Amino acid sequence: MAALTFFYMPSKTMLYNFDMQEVVFLPAGYFVLQSDYDAPDGYIKVTYDDLEGYVKADSVQQVDYTPKTKYELTAKFTCDNDGQPVRLRAAPKKSAQVLDVLSDNSTGRFYGAVEGEALIKDAGTDWYYVSAQGKHGYVYYAYVKADEIPPNIIEKEQDQPDVPTDATPQIVEDDGGMPTTAAIIFIVALCIPVPFIMYYLFKKPKND
């Protein structure tokens, strides 16, 4: 099996889809896994847990180990729009296709942010890339609350010793085809009468 090649992201790193469109800034301190060598010049084809795409080659650093924590998996978002539903869109802009309508207090996974169109004047242009109800898409940041992505603790994954699939003790046969354990018992049984035989052979007769 070929060794897995991981790349460390020292700062927030843009993930591009296969049409070379920006998807989301992946969090600093985590890793992407090279998935194939087929990529445009200056890019690497990668996976980040359940996301696929390209990253710029000069934005990441190859490592010679498998990290214990590869991706951020814990950050969540919660819809918080004064009781109103939140639209999950295919792109970070108002005109983008609505993929789903999330009810108030709906939750899902939060990957990171990307800049898009301001839905509220002077409120900012951040959109969150999320997954909810089986779909990936964008929600406007002002309509949700998102967890802060925790810093990664860089540790190498420890090698696990090979565990045999069949733990049944094996009996090794000797050259004669008899199991070793049985052979030992047989030899001991043969040896036990010897002292008694020697005693009677060399015993001096009693004088009457």
Image (spheres, rainbow, N blue to C red):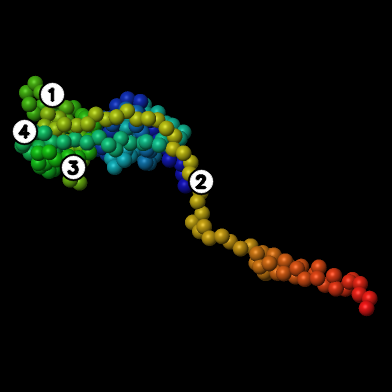
Alpha carbon separation for disc pair 2 and 3: 38 Å
Q: How crowded is mark 3: few (under 14 residues within 10 Å), some or many (20 or more)?
A: some
The residue drawn where x is 72% and y is 66% is: 188
Give whichever of 129, 83 is nearer the camera.
83
Residue 110 appears in view: yes
Residue 126's quadrant in the figure? top left
Q: Which mark is residue 161?
A: 2
Q: Residues within 10 Å of mark 1 (few under 14, many from 20)?
A: some
Q: Residue 132 carries which label?
A: 3
Q: In the image, is 11 to the left or to the right of 179?
A: left
The C terminus lies in quadrant:
bottom right
Badge nearest the viewer, 4 or 1? 4
Query: Which three-letter amino acid code belongs to the residue tagged 4?
Result: Asp
Q: Number of numbered discs present?
A: 4
Badge nearest the viewer, 4 or 3? 4
Q: How crowded is mark 4: few (under 14 residues within 10 Å), some or many (20 or more)?
A: few
Alpha carbon separation for disc pair 2 and 1: 52 Å
Residue 43's quadrant in the figure? top left
Q: What element carries label 1?
A: loop
| First along the sequence among labels 2 and 1 | 1
| First along the sequence among labels 2 and 3 | 3
Q: Where is residue 132 in the image (x, y as percent from the top left)?
A: 18, 42
Q: Which mark is residue 124?
A: 1
In the image, residue 208 above or below residue 128: below
Verify CB contact (< 8 Å) between mark 1 and mark 3. no
Which residue does the numbered mark 4 point to in the structure image?
Answer: 82
